[in-house]
Structures are given as C-alpha cells and as structure tokens.
Image (cartoon, helix red, strand yellow):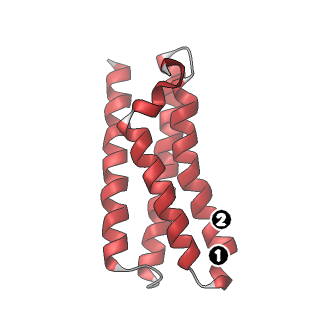
Amino acid sequence: MDKFRFLNWKVYQESRELLAFVLNIVKKLPKEYRFELGSQIIRSAFSVLLNIAEGSGKASDKELNHFFNIAHGSLYETFAGIDFFRYNKLITKEEFMKATQTIHSIGGQLGGFKKSLKS
C-alpha cells in the first residue's frame, strides 16, 4: 500500500470525512437546491480529496505543492458553500460548526504540508 501513501495521511482521511458530510447535507437540501448548489459543493469537496491523492503520486515536491494549493483553494470553496447554507438556514448551527472544525483542521494540515515542502 506504499504506492497509495495518501491513504495513511490524516489530511486525506479528514477530507474523505468532509466529502461524506457534504453528501449527507446535500441529501437534506430542498429539491430545488440539490442540483445547482448541491452538485457544486460536492465537486469542491471531492476536489480537495482528489487533489491530495493526485499530488501524492507526483515525483517532485514542487508538483505535490501545486496539487495541495489546488486542494486548499477547493477547501475554501467548500467552506463558502457551507457558510451559504448556514446563512440561508439550510443547515443547523451544529452542522456548520462540525464542518468548520473539519475544514479548519484540513486547512492547517495542508498549510503544514506546504510549509514543510518549501523548507
């Protein structure tokens, strides 16, 4: 399993949890919002997960850092979607707080990874 080293990374595991959380939120959205808003936030959360995985397979730290930058941007996009849902009362305060904690953790880990790659 060393070939898929990302499976052991906490940042990947938490990103997988975030995607599962987003999928559950989207299931609960009113039907008129599921396609447009739901598919966009699913794509952004999935992008975080996929870019971490894809970057882990690259040969250089520079390439890995590039994919972590993309994942970080997608994480912000996911948070903006979660914030929009909270603002419009489409999710509970508890759901918002849980998502925020997970997003904050993932962002910190990505930042740490990127910092260590630059040194």
User: Would you name the residue on which mark 1 appears?
Assistant: 34
Q: Position of residue 13 (x, y in %)?
A: 42, 43
Q: In this figure, which residue is indicated by the disc labeled 2?
A: 39
Determine the residue positioned at 50% across, 22% down.
1
- Count every numbered label the image shows and give the total: 2
SS class, disc 2: helix
The C terminus - image quarter: top left
Farthest residue, direction top: 59
Image height of 77 relative to 119, above or below = below
Horizontal side of residue 101 vs 59, given as left or right: left
Q: Residue at x 46, y 62 (%)?
A: 21
Q: Residue at x 33, y 28 (%)?
A: 115
**Disc number at residue 119?**
none
Image height check: is 99 above or below 75? Answer: below
The reply, left or right, for residue 58 in relation to residue 6 is right
Mark 1 and mark 2: Cα distance apart in space: 7 Å
SS for dot 1? helix
Tell me if mark 1 has few (under 14), some (14-19) or many (20+) residues whose alpha carbon lies within 10 angstroms of its own: some
Hey, what amino acid is under mark 1?
Answer: Arg
Give the camera-side residue of 23 and 52.
23
Image location of residue 105, percent across then percent down: 31, 48
Circle 2 crowding by C-alpha within 10 Å: few under 14, some 14–19, many from 20: few
Q: Which residue is at the front of the view, 117 or 91?
A: 91
- Image side of residue 107 versus residue 71, left or right: left
Contact between marks 1 and 2 (CB within 8 A): the answer is yes
